[in-house]
Amino acid sequence: MEGTWATNTENKVEIWRTQTSSGTEPGTSPPIGNTNPGTYTGPPRREATFDQCMDSWSFVSCYRGPDEEETPEEAEPEQATPAITITDLAQFAPAPTPLAGEPSNLGIAGMATNFVATASVTTASGTLFGLPIAVRFTPSAYDFHYGDGTDATTTSGGQSWDALGQAQFTPTATSHVYRDRGAYSADVDVRYTAEVDLGTGWIPVAGELTADGPPQEIRIFEAHTALVAYTCDQKPSSPGC
């Protein structure tokens, strides 16, 4: 058995401890400051005046036994993950989308030229703020720039005339009519919404990210008609044949 107690005599606190050692009878350890050999095997004792101990409000602060544990240090709080903005995701942006004009990037003044922009949902992965992250982009809008000063915004990238089951030069949701012949630099900018996954599921990020498309030259020609008595099959030498 072990025990520790204190007595107060003439402005001095004496702390006593008893300890049972293997093979010996229980003994009484010397008071604080006593250097005589005994059965006490703990750390060196310290003398402290009564006033010093009273200043600390507890005589226990004058002595700590060998069986008392150190007070564990408080763990540092984990660093919070910074808020992610759409600008932070620019490094993961999808590749620009090229613009295709029908037929074969050619057109006729006064008639519809069809445009198709093929963009789809894409996913990228990497690190952001030192954390592994996955980013998913979904097309939300298409900004067509036709090169003649006119623009159009759609929610679809358009389809070919064949896919729509329409004849060439007929209007579509993404077609454009050039009034004059010439060469025009057209392009399409695709806007994307984004979601991120930090290992806990997909979380939407406010705003849109725009991927600017490369310019594409569109050549527009004039078409002339003439009244003839025969078709080109009937008379190949006729004007316009």
Image (tube, rainbow, N blue to C red):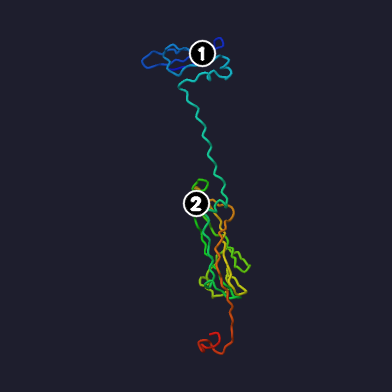
Q: Residue furthest front?
A: 183
Along the line of sight, which residue is nearer the eye, 142 or 7? 142
Residue 98: percent from left, percent from top: 53, 64
Quarter of the image with the N terminus in it:
top left
At label 2, the amino acid type is Ala
Residue 54: percent from left, percent from top: 58, 17
Up the image or down, 9 lies above or below 233; here it is: above
Q: Quadrant of residue 158?
A: bottom right
Along the line of sight, which residue is nearer the eye, 82 or 21? 82
Q: Where is mark 2, residue-wise?
A: 134
- Label pair 2/1, CB-CB below 8 angstroms: no
Q: Estimate the spatial distance between the alpha carbons at disc 2 and disc 1, rounded to whole Å.
A: 67 Å
Q: Earlier in the sequence, mark 2 or mark 1?
A: 1
What's the residue at 48%, 26% (across, down)?
70
Q: Quadrant of residue 27?
A: top left
Q: Residue furthest left?
A: 23
Is disc 1 surrounded by few (<14), some (14 to 19) or many (20+) residues within 10 Å? many
Q: Where is mark 1, residue-wise?
A: 14
Residue 233: percent from left, percent from top: 50, 87
What's the residue at 54%, 50% (across, down)?
203
Residue 118: percent from left, percent from top: 52, 64
The secondary element bearing badge 2 is classed as: strand
Up the image or down, 47 lies above or below 167; here it is: above
The secondary element bearing badge 1 is classed as: strand
Q: How many marks?
A: 2
Is disc 2 surrounded by few (<14), some (14 to 19) or many (20+) residues within 10 Å? some
Along the line of sight, which residue is nearer the eye, 106 or 159? 106
At label 1, the amino acid type is Glu
